[in-house]
């Protein structure tokens, strides 16, 4: 889909004209003249009230059709973005012209761009009849060209992450995923290394090798660097890349296994974010580390009671092989910390406990200190992504004590599981500023609405780009 500023001389003859409507049938700012052409009786007969998710096509003297799109009770960034997503799915023409950027809020052009590109996203690789979205071009009246270009760059990286998350595990082995990430990051100008199983063994990444031991598909690790001129801050991004999670010998039930192709979301998100950061030329040094492997059942699989030795930090007694994400992240954090970054952020679909705590629409994060927590809070708010700070309660650390190793990989308690998982990872941060993002709930969307489409969401990409932008400014 192409996004651009609408020309001064509008040609609406083959286009859908998008007009915002507030609840109670009030025109959104900037759409008054067009909304005045709408027949109130027709709107009432159709049950259109301007509510969120509602759309209604009506005649227009210049456009092929006028699409009224409900924005709810108030105008803000989210309502503009969501209305734009709903509009591109409802439009029946290839071209859309929208007035939603005239609405008078900061970032309106970004909201329209993100909503259009992300709301119009479709994963069509396995569909015999193609997709349902007809729109191929969106023209934004009174749009900000620079803002549109930047938002389009980030949104296209989000859709890349979504594509990876939506791809079935049969077509996304660790080696296939590594090759695709390498191609994407190389194209953005990063220096990329793909560590194969021999290199992983040579580097002594014992936790990653332990998780990979049960799979016939060998592991990989992505190590990529972006070193722009003028960078004064170094950000490390570490992503969990479990290309399929059976639970290992502590096997999952069939119903819990159905969505486990998405357990590589963390790796997809950090790679996509690094790609966007590089394309935007943000002057922050970035190191990407993404350990990639299946967690499978096999004759060589790690057994409950086995002890693993990560590249750095405490040895680990594995009591539950389904708590494998933290194991490969231990090695990922160890590799990343060796680069001596100023800030490390790991992203993972890590715990069911976080999903229970915050549900499907909110991700949690833990931070090593208050300043770092505030950075994430501000960046997520600016990016329009829902992240909620969770407490890193160090009193719970003793629950991870092991009789035979430095730590065990699960606490043994049914309470506070997301916190003890974060405390486990904290042991491998080399006491550097660090954030752990647990996206277990919102990594996939179970409904289509606004800028979200059923399937992988790419949550975190926009926040990580905003973190990089803020680090560059500071």
Image (cartoon, rainbow, N blue to C red):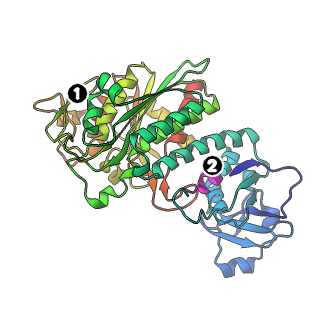
Dot 2 falls on a residue whose secondary structure is helix
Is residue 407 visible in the rendered image? The answer is: yes
Residue shown at the point (26%, 45%) measured from the top left: 417
**Nearer the viewer's eye, disc 2 or disc 1?**
1
Residue shown at the point (19%, 38%) measured from the top left: 318
Give the main secondary structure of the magenta stretch.
helix
Q: Residues within 10 Å of mark 1 (few under 14, many from 20)?
A: many
Q: Residues within 10 Å of mark 2 (few under 14, many from 20)?
A: many
Mark 1 — residue? Answer: 309
Check the picture and name the quadrant holding the C terminus: top right
**Looking at the image, residue 154 lies above or below residue 13:** above
Q: Measured from the top left, where is residue 126 in percent x and y?
A: 51, 59
Q: Measured from the top left, where is residue 293 in percent x and y?
A: 35, 40
Image-based side of 449 in relation to 1, left or right: left
Name the image quarter holding residue 38: bottom right
Residue shown at the point (55%, 36%) measured from the top left: 184
Q: Measured from the top left, where is residue 416 in percent x and y?
A: 26, 45
Image-based side of 46 in relation to 463, left or right: right
Q: Are marks 2 and 1 in contact (CB under 8 Å)?
A: no
Mark 2 — residue? Answer: 114
The label on residue 6 is none
Tally of numbered discs? 2
């Amino acid at each position: 889909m192409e996004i651009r500023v609408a020309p001064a001389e509008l040609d609406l003859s083959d286009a859908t004209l998008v007009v915002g409507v507030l609840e109670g049938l009030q025109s959104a700012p900037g759409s008054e003249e067009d909304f005045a052409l709408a027949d109130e009786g027709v709107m009432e007969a159709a049950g259109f009230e301007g509510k969120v998710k509602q759309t209604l096509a009506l005649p227009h003297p210049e456009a092929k059709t006028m699409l009224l799109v409900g924005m709810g009770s108030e105008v803000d960034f989210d309502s503009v973005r969501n209305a734009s997503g709903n509009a591109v799915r409802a439009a029946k023409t290839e071209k859309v012209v929208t007035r939603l950027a005239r609405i008078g809020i900061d970032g309106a052009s970004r909201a329209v761009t993100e909503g259009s590109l992300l709301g119009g996203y479709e994963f069509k690789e396995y569909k015999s009849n193609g997709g349902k979205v007809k729109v191929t071009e969106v023209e934004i009246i009174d749009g900000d060209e620079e803002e549109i270009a930047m938002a389009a760059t980030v949104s296209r990286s989000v859709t890349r992450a979504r594509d990876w998350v939506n791809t079935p595990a049969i077509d996304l082995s660790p080696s296939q995923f590594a090759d695709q990430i390498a191609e994407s990051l190389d194209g953005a100008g990063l220096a990329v290394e793909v560590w194969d199983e021999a290199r992983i063994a040579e580097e002594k990444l014992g936790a990653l090798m332990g998780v990979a031991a049960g799979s016939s598909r060998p592991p990989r690790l992505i190590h990529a660097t972006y070193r722009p001129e003028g960078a004064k801050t170094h950000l490390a991004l570490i992503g969990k890349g479990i290309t399929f999670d059976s639970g290992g010998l502590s096997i999952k039930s069939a119903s819990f296994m159905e969505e486990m192709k998405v357990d590589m979301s963390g790796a997809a998100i950090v790679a996509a974010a690094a790609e966007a950061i590089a394309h935007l030329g943000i002057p922050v040094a970035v190191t990407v580390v993404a350990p990639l492997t299946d967690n499978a059942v096999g004759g060589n699989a790690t057994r409950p009671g086995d002890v693993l030795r990560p590249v750095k930090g405490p040895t680990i007694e594995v009591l539950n092989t389904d708590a494998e994400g933290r194991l490969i992240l231990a090695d990922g954090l160890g590799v990343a910390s060796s680069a001596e970054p100023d800030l490390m952020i790991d992203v993972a679909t890590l715990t069911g406990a976080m999903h229970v705590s915050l549900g499907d629409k909110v991700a949690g994060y833990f931070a090593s200190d208050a300043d770092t927590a505030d950075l994430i809070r501000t960046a997520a708010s600016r990016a329009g992504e829902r992240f909620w700070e969770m407490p890193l309660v160090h009193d719970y650390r003793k629950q991870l004590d092991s009789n035979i190793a430095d730590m065990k990989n699960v606490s043994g308690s049914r309470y506070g599981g997301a916190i003890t998982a974060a405390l486990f990872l904290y042991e491998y941060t080399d006491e550097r500023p660090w954030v752990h993002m647990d996206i277990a709930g919102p990594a996939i969307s179970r409904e289509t609405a606004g800028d979200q489409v059923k399937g992988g969401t790419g949550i975190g990409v926009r926040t990580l780009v905003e973190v990089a932008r803020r680090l560059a400014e500071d």
